[in-house]
């Protein structure tokens, strides 16, 4: 699966669906306009005179009212869903899973989610359980991979084996990586916008329905109060009926799109895990459970198209079903299936015992590197590297599991704990070459807290012993904890980190990468990137020239070698206006680079793929990838919202 193409296809599908819903909205306006003509005649009391079918002022009023109500409702729902996956999960009663949970089922779920995140290179999503829900279901929600949440029902945790749970989670990760979450968010907002007309009509009927029409009529024929009241009630009824019909049309489109995406997600789950029995087993148990995937919470209908399984009963022959028939889904995975569902029993699991702190495993690191071709590869193949971006495969799954097991328990615990995650970030910024730590620890104690300084000192030996290639990927594990920081704590973290970075008067590539990834992680929590802001390639030519120049100079022997590396990387942008030009090193490169990456992040996904491939080409110009270049590449990828595998093929 090509992550960039998948994201771009999702964006194009969103555009086509928006056009479809605009047409539905125009049809709703036309229907309401026709109704308004008759209502206006009813209110005037002059029913004998033929109606004029073109009344510009009336049409404008109907159009403005319809667009205003639908627009405000759609925007309100979009903002609510755009707040991030955790907000959606909590809206349906989700309970956040603590990383230090002693419940073996929840820990298994958390480990599966982390392993898949590390394998695909996306930030670890928040993990939720839906307590009291006996059905087998799950969903992924969020506006982008960087602010996602994965939620699983209690029934799924109780009845699915680890392989089956992995298949379900792989299905949800397909939605994350394919851009389906953003598509679902927009669909929900548009459908609710049309439904709002029906809600308004119901409100009008309730507000005026109690008024006695007969009493108004007795005031006299000349008063016209009765006719006006009847016209208002007729308007409310028209809004109710026409709005609901438009809403049904929107739900039909939404359901059709959702069914198509579910087939693709099932297929992707098999591709990711290479274990068809996992997701097929989960679907068979779903069919054998009396409640299926139904959810009892009243807000479940709002997320039906986010879910692994149908969470409500669909009438009308499945016309409004958000998921294909279970038998059809299973036969697509197992063509020889005998048609028998499995009665799912509650699985007994042993009590979880926390593991003792472990040292980094060289064997685990070797497994990870082998999964990506090994560090001894003579050169970095940019195309191969980009092919692994956002990819879930057996190789990346093995690498993610090996990475997960290679992290010492104290570092993993700190990455999971909002109270200790800041200290971990400070530790990653401390020198590893024997430089005295006391001045930097004093700076941490002064700008943050003495407790953070003590913990950073305690963790330092663990980080030093950790292979350099595994240090920055630790931030992936820390994403959920970082997102839980209060605004004041986030500001303190970034301020202290900035002081540490500039304490020696220079910024190393590792420090730049650390800051960039943290700024990106914390920034997305408060303001997910607005996809409506898109910059054309010719608008970022100068920024691209600067960023490629910095990449080309990273480990170049001299300016001549840097210029040659730049030229090799810039070839794929021939024809871009203004043309790319190499920029010699300058005193403000770091500050300008930060702003340049922000601009490049707003370009379309296929162009961002070309940008990242150009960075990899520049770094690989000397037929190798150093750890410094790997850190910069990871920072650039994070800034561009492009996932990378947990381990890069760094040359020995």
Image (spheres, rainbow, N blue to C red):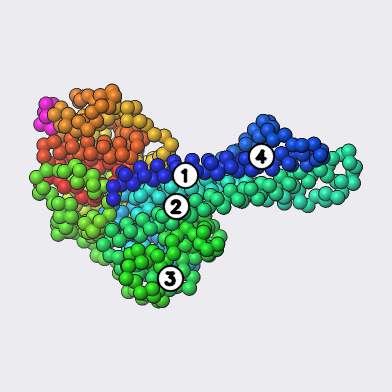
- Residue 504 visible? The answer is no
Residue drawn at x 11%, y 29% as measured from the top left: 561
Magenta-colored span: 556-562
- Quarter of the rendering containing residue 615: top left
Residue drawn at x 13%, y 29% as measured from the top left: 564
Q: Sequence order check: which comes first, mark 4 or mark 3?
A: 4
Name the one closer to the observer, 329 or 77.
329
* Up-down relation of residue 248 to residue 358 (above or below): above
Give yes or no for contact between labels 1 and 2 (Cβ–Cβ under 8 Å): yes
Q: Sequence order check: which comes first, mark 1 or mark 4?
A: 1
Residue drawn at x 25%, y 24% as measured from the top left: 579
Q: CA distance from mark 1 to mark 3?
A: 32 Å
* Up-down relation of residue 579 to residue 271 (above or below): above
Location of mark 1 (residue)? 17
Residue drawn at x 15%, y 43% as measured from the top left: 380
Which SS class for mark 4? helix
Location of mark 4 (residue)? 33
Say few, some or many: other residues with alpha carbon within 10 Å of mark 2 (under 14 / 14 to 19 / 20 or more).
Answer: some
Query: Would residue 525 be counted in the magenta stretch?
Result: no
Name the one closer to the observer, 135 or 244.
244
Q: CA distance from mark 1 to mark 4?
A: 24 Å
Location of mark 3 (residue)? 287
Q: CA distance from mark 4 to mark 2?
A: 30 Å
Q: Sequence order check: which comes first, mark 4 or mark 2?
A: 4
Instruction: Identify the mark at residue 257; answer none if there is no mark.
Output: 2
């Amino acid at each position: 699966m090509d992550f960039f193409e998948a994201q771009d296809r999702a964006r194009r599908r969103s555009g086509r669906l928006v056009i479809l819903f605009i047409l539905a909205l125009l049809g709703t306006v036309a229907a309401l306009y026709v109704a308004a003509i008759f209502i206006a005649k009813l209110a005037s009391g002059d029913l004998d005179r033929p109606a004029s079918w073109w009344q510009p002022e009336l049409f404008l009023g109907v159009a403005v009212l319809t667009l205003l109500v639908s627009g405000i409702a759609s925007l309100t729902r979009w903002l609510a869903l755009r707040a991030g996956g955790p907000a959606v999960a909590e809206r349906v009663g989700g309970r956040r899973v603590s990383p230090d949970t002693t419940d073996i089922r929840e820990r298994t779920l958390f480990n599966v989610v982390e392993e898949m995140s590390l394998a695909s290179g996306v930030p670890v999503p928040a993990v939720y359980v839906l307590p009291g829900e006996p059905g087998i279901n799950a969903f992924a929600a969020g506006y982008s991979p960087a602010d996602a949440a994965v939620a699983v029902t209690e029934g799924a945790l109780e009845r699915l084996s680890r392989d089956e749970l992995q298949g379900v989670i792989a299905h949800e990760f397909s939605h994350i990586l394919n851009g389906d979450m953003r598509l679902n968010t927009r669909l929900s907002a548009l459908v609710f916008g049309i439904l709002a007309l029906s809600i308004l009509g119901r409100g009008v009927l309730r507000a005026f329905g109690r008024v006695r029409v007969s009493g108004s009529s007795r005031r006299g024929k000349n008063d016209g109060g009765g006719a006006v009241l009847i016209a208002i009630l007729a308007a409310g009824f028209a809004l109710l009926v026409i709005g609901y019909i438009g809403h049904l049309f929107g739900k039909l489109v939404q359901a059709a799109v959702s069914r198509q995406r579910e087939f693709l997600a099932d297929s992707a789950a098999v591709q990711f895990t290479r274990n068809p029995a996992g997701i097929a087993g989960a679907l068979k148990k779903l069919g054998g459970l009396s409640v299926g995937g139904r959810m009892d919470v009243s807000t479940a209908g709002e997320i039906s198209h986010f879910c692994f399984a149908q969470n409500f009963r669909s009438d009308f022959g499945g016309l409004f079903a958000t998921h294909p028939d279970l038998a059809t889904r299973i036969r697509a995975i197992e063509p020889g299936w005998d048609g028998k569902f499995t009665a799912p029993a509650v699985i007994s699991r042993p009590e979880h015992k926390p593991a003792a702190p472990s040292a980094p495993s060289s064997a685990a690191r070797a497994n990870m590197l082998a999964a990506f071709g090994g560090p001894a590869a003579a050169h970095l193949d940019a195309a191969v590297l980009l092919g692994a971006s956002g990819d879930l495969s057996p190789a990346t799954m093995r690498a993610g599991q090996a990475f997960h097991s290679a992290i010492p328990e104290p570092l993993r615990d700190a990455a999971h704990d909002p109270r200790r995650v800041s200290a971990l970030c400070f530790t990653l910024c401390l020198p590893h070459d024997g430089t005295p730590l006391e001045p930097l620890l004093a700076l941490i104690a002064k700008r943050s807290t003495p407790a953070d300084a003590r913990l950073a000192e305690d963790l330092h030996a663990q980080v030093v012993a950790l292979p350099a290639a595994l240090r920055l990927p630790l931030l992936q594990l820390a994403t959920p904890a970082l997102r839980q920081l209060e605004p004041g704590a986030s500001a303190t973290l970034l301020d202290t980190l900035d002081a540490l970075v500039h304490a020696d008067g220079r910024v190393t590539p590792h420090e730049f990468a650390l800051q960039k990834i943290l700024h990106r992680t914390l920034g997305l929590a408060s303001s997910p990137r607005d996809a409506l802001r898109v910059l054309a390639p010719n608008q970022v030519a100068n920024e691209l020239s600067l960023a490629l120049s910095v990449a080309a100079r990273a480990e170049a022997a001299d300016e001549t070698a840097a210029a040659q590396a730049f030229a090799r990387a810039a070839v794929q942008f021939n024809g871009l206006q203004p043309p790319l030009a190499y920029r010699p090193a300058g005193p403000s490169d770091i500050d300008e680079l930060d702003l340049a990456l922000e601009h490049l992040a707003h370009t379309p996904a296929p162009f961002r793929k070309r940008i990242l491939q150009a960075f990899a080409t520049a770094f690989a110009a000397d037929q190798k990838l150093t750890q410094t270049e790997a850190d910069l590449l990871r920072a650039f990828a994070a800034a561009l919202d492009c996932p990378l595998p947990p381990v890069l093929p760094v040359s020995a």
